[in-house]
Image (tube, coloured by chain):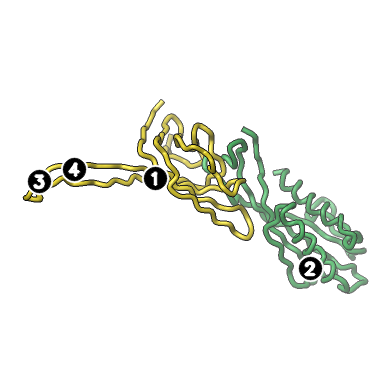
Chain colours: A green, B yellow
Amino acid sequence: MNRIKAEVDRIVARLKENSALSGIRFVREYSSNQLESPIDGWLAAVCITDVKLSKSYVGGYMSSSIRGEVYSAGVEIRLFAPAEENGSGLSELAGEIISTLSESKNELNISSVTASAIGFDPNSDAVYRTVSCKLEFCASGEAV
Amino acid sequence: MPFDFVKGSEVKIRVNGEILGGVHSAEIADKSTVKKIEEYLSDIPVAEQKNTVYKIKLTLESGSLAPLEGVELESVQISCGNTSVSFGECSTESISVKIPPDGAALHTVTIEARRRSVENE
């Protein structure tokens, strides 16, 4: 299932193109590197929450020449505000992420974008907001 | 083999010999009309004439807004394992498309066939 990682990388690459988001460091959540504490600068932890089969076709044929199935995946971008900022600017940056993802829906195969309320993470001692999106992709398309 | 059912993932649908992709589901129905021939003056049925047509309803996603447009429908073949069911003398009865605001457009194609044959290889 490396395709899903590639799809998530495309999302992050697209967000990095937005100059308003240039000050954010994107890291993988649940990687071997622990999230820093206290948070130094804007940090976005990206993780894949779930993957499931969303569409399958008779005979496995997506089209007359490609066999495969369509999966949908949930991706979470948890945006942490720096400890010293006390959450100032969090909603503006989260809004910028939402609008960038919404504008690139077709390009990135995103079906929906949502954002959570502002929360507090006691482990990293920081406030955060989570932007979630659902994306659809073909996990193992092969030409016939 | 503990289970021996027809599974959708093993079924191939061909139209004019070409594999049809993006098919969500296929529905095949036999529709028979029986005409009774009645005896003159007594109205007692003495014979029946049966006429069967086969309806193939396909629900599919397609890259085109008008799939099968311009395709001269000659045959539809549905095969699984060694068995294939072929439908001949086909004509398109109806095509409809449902376009959701997000996701792919879903086409419903109903094909009427007058001939059916089952082949076991």
Task: Return the x and y of residue B59 as percentages of the image width and height.
Answer: 50, 49
| Of A34 and A142, the residue lying toward us | A142
| Element assignment for label 3 | loop
How far, Cα to Cα, is label 2 from label 3?
A: 83 Å
Q: Mark 3 highlights which residue?
A: B39
Q: Is residue A100 visible?
A: yes
How far, Cα to Cα, is label 2 from label 1?
A: 53 Å
Residue B55 is marked as: 1
How far, Cα to Cα, is label 3 from label 4?
A: 12 Å
Q: Mark 4 highlights which residue?
A: B48
Label 2 vs label 3, nearer the camera: 3
Task: Return the x and y of residue A98 as percentages of the image width and height.
Answer: 77, 64
Q: Report the residue at 39% width, 36% height from top.
A: B89
Comes first in the chain, label 3 or label 4 = 3
| Of B59 and A26, the residue lying toward us | B59
* Kind of residue sitting beneath label 4: Glu
Both labels 2 and 1 in a single chain: no
Q: Is residue A123 left or right of residue B20?
A: right
Task: Return the x and y of residue B87 as percentages of the image width and height.
Answer: 40, 36
Both labels 3 and 1 in a single chain: yes
| Element assignment for label 2 | strand
Task: Return the x and y of residue B74 as percentages of the image width and height.
Answer: 45, 35
How far, Cα to Cα, is label 4 from label 1?
A: 22 Å
* Kind of residue sitting beneath label 1: Lys
